[in-house]
Amino acid sequence: MALPDSSISVEELPFPEIIELNVGGQVYITRFSTLTSVPDSLLWEMFSRKSAKGLARDTKGRFFVDRDGFLFRYILDYMRDQQLVLPDHFPERGRLQREAEFFNLPELVKLLVPKISKQNSLGDEGCQSDPEDSSPGIDTARNLSSQGAAAAACASLVPGAHGWQTFRVHHHRLQRLIYSGP
């Protein structure tokens, strides 16, 4: 009876069906088929090799990826069924988009790009005068959806002592000063 060749390292064996990942200190356990479900993605490239040789591992032998471990859960969820499901009022959308770009997931990137429709644009038709402010030409936000994060509030410049210096954001009732010259 022949004994198996013990000179073959673990890194040279094909990938197991269940894979443990350490992403930024967070441990994830998933299927090999999930990691290779999106062709040409970074994870597909990493795990479509014949062996694990050359892939970084942590001290416990898990595959290591030096990225945001918290946001990776959304990357992995997307890879399971190619759908994006985020919690309400998700504040990390821009960072998740950057992670999707890193993992080479262009369809996920498209889903994360903020969409500003005509009704959510910052043009004149999307703003109205503030009833509390008697100055004409001061605009406020109206009908901005939560998806219009890039247009969080309708704002305008108002005349200051030396030109257009005061930036007013009515949605939060804040004032910001912008220095525009000497």
Image (cartoon, helix red, strand yellow):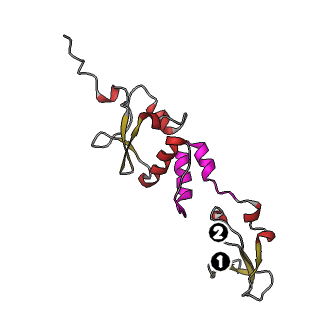
- Across and down, in percent, residue 116 comes to 70, 60
Q: Secondary structure at mark 1?
A: loop
Q: Secondary structure at mark 2?
A: loop
Residue 92 falls within the magenta-colored stretch: yes
Look at the numbered discs 2 and 1 and tell me whether their residues touch, using CB distance below 8 Å: yes
Q: Which residues are the magenta region? A: 87-115
Give the residue furthest to the top: 1
Give the labeled residue for mark 2: 152
Figure quadrant of the C terminus: bottom right
Query: Is 89 situated above or below 49?
Result: below
- The residue at the point 67 percent across, 79 percent down is 170
How many other residues sit within 10 Å of disc 2, few (<14), some (14-19) or many (≥20)?
some
The disc placed on residue 154 is none
- The residue at the point 51 percent across, 35 percent down is 37
Instruction: Decide which of tag 2 and tag 1 comes sooner along the chain.
Output: 2
Kind of residue indicated by mark 1: His
Figure quadrant of the N terminus: top left
Query: Is 129 situated above or below 124?
Result: below
Give the labeled residue for mark 1: 171
Give me the C-alpha separation between circle 2 and circle 1: 8 Å
Residue 102 falls within the magenta-colored stretch: yes
Left or right position of 152 against 130: left
Kind of residue indicated by mark 2: Ala
- Across and down, in percent, residue 34 comes to 46, 37
